[in-house]
């Protein structure tokens, strides 16, 4: 048997086996909630389909143009003007819709990762429980908080309780094991937090390039109209210039939104990882302090 730890606290010592069963139950519930098909993988194809339908049936509606050829929109008709952007427009719209959809998805996911309550209060409560050697109470805080941060803390507490009853290792080795457990749990949680962020980063750079392609194609059309013998066709000339400007506007706007959202989410993730590092350090130091 391990040493009697009741001398470290006025509170009764909780058997490690009971704590372990608590942790297994909580982690099993979290795993069950996280299982299932990832609907976020359907966002891009759905965005493409929606963009094509909007381009063909909404922006390309004959009511937006002066004639059936759809070469000249009615005065002040913005939808018809967007349609003149050409086939690049649905691609840029797909990127924009994807950016908005993934931004909403990340807001929800990162919000859940933080947990159901205030992260600062959660960390403060766990530290308080640890200082009183109330491991069971700290575990209960994790079960109430939920989320990625609580999962990492739960893994650390699991190892903490396991090391309490271990008599084969030195204090330094036990502390190292606790730190390693927290690092491994953090490594498992980070991919969930950072998922889909590379897509936003890609859109932030690619949208501008695609818009530039559309701009070049539009200017080619404009110069071709000017090269026609005699007086340039003003309809073709305006269509080419419109294609260039519309693609530029949509591409720059999409890129700007993607950059802003990416920076917001990375900032939120940095805050979560800082909280994890802080509580992980507290768990290890609390254990080490009680062994000296």
Image: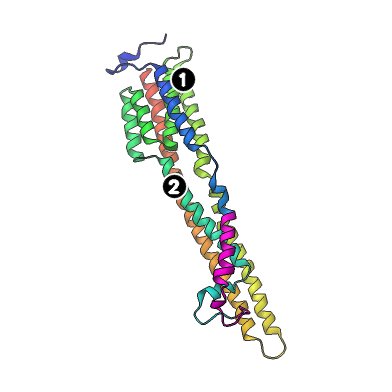
Would residue 118 be counted in the magenta stretch? no
Most prominent secondary structure in the magenta stretch? Answer: helix
**What whole-number distance in Å separates the C-alpha atoms at marks 2 and 1?**
37 Å
Residue at the limit of the structure toward the top, as seen here: 1
> From the viewer's perspective, is residue 205 above or below residue 150?
below
Residues under numbered marks 2 and 1 in contact, where contact means CB atoms less than 8 Å apart: no
For mark 1, what is the residue? Answer: 174
Dot 2 surroundings within 10 Å: few (below 14), some, or many (20 or more)? few
Name the residue: 49% across, 23% down: 177
Residue stretch in magenta:
45-71
Indicate the secondary structure of the residue bearing disc 1: helix
Percent across and percent down for residue 31 are 49, 33
Q: Which mark is residue 265?
A: none
Dot 1 surroundings within 10 Å: few (below 14), some, or many (20 or more)? many
| Label 2 vs 1, first from the N-terminus | 2
**Image quadrant where residue 250 sits:** bottom right
Residue at the limit of the structure toward the bottom, as seen here: 230
Residue 35 visible to an observer of this rendering: yes
- Front in this rendered view, residue 93 or 69: 69
- Front in this rendered view, residue 74 or 222: 74
User: Would residue 56 be found to the left or right of residue 32 on screen?
Assistant: right
> From the viewer's perspective, is residue 168 above or below residue 200?
above
Percent across and percent down for residue 259 are 50, 56
Nearest to the eye among marks 2 and 1: give it. Answer: 2
Indicate the secondary structure of the residue bearing disc 2: helix
Question: How many marks do you count on the picture?
Answer: 2
Percent across and percent down for residue 78 are 51, 75
Percent across and percent down for residue 274 are 42, 39
For mark 2, what is the residue? Answer: 108
Quadrant of the rendering where the N terminus is positioned? top left
């Amino acid at each position: 048997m391990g040493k009697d730890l009741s001398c470290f606290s006025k509170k009764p010592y909780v058997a490690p086996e009971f704590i372990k069963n608590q942790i297994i139950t909580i982690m099993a519930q979290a795993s069950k909630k996280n299982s299932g098909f990832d609907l976020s993988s359907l966002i891009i194809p759905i965005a493409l389909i929606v963009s094509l339908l909007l381009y063909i049936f909404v922006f390309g509606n004959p009511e937006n143009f002066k004639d059936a050829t759809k070469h000249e929109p009615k005065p002040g008709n913005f939808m018809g003007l967007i349609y003149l952007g050409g086939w690049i427009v649905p691609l840029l719209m797909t990127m924009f819709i994807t950016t908005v959809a993934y931004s909403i998805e990340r807001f929800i996911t990162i919000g859940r990762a933080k947990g159901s309550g205030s992260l600062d209060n959660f960390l403060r409560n766990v530290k308080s429980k640890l200082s009183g050697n109330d491991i069971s109470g700290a575990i209960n805080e994790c079960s109430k908080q939920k989320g990625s941060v609580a999962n990492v803390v739960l893994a650390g507490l699991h190892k903490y309780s396991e090391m309490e009853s271990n008599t084969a290792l030195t204090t330094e080795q036990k502390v190292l094991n606790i730190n390693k457990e927290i690092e491994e749990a953090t490594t498992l949680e980070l991919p969930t937090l950072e998922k889909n962020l590379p897509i936003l980063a890609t859109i932030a750079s690619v949208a501008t390039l695609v818009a530039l392609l559309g701009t070049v194609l539009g200017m080619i059309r404009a110069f071709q109209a000017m090269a026609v013998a005699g007086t340039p066709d003003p309809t073709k000339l305006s269509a080419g210039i419109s294609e260039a400007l519309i693609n530029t506007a949509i591409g720059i706007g999409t890129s700007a939104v993607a950059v802003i959202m990416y920076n917001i989410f990375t900032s939120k993730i940095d805050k979560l990882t800082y909280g994890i590092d802080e509580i992980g350090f507290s768990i290890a130091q609390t254990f080490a302090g009680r062994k000296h």
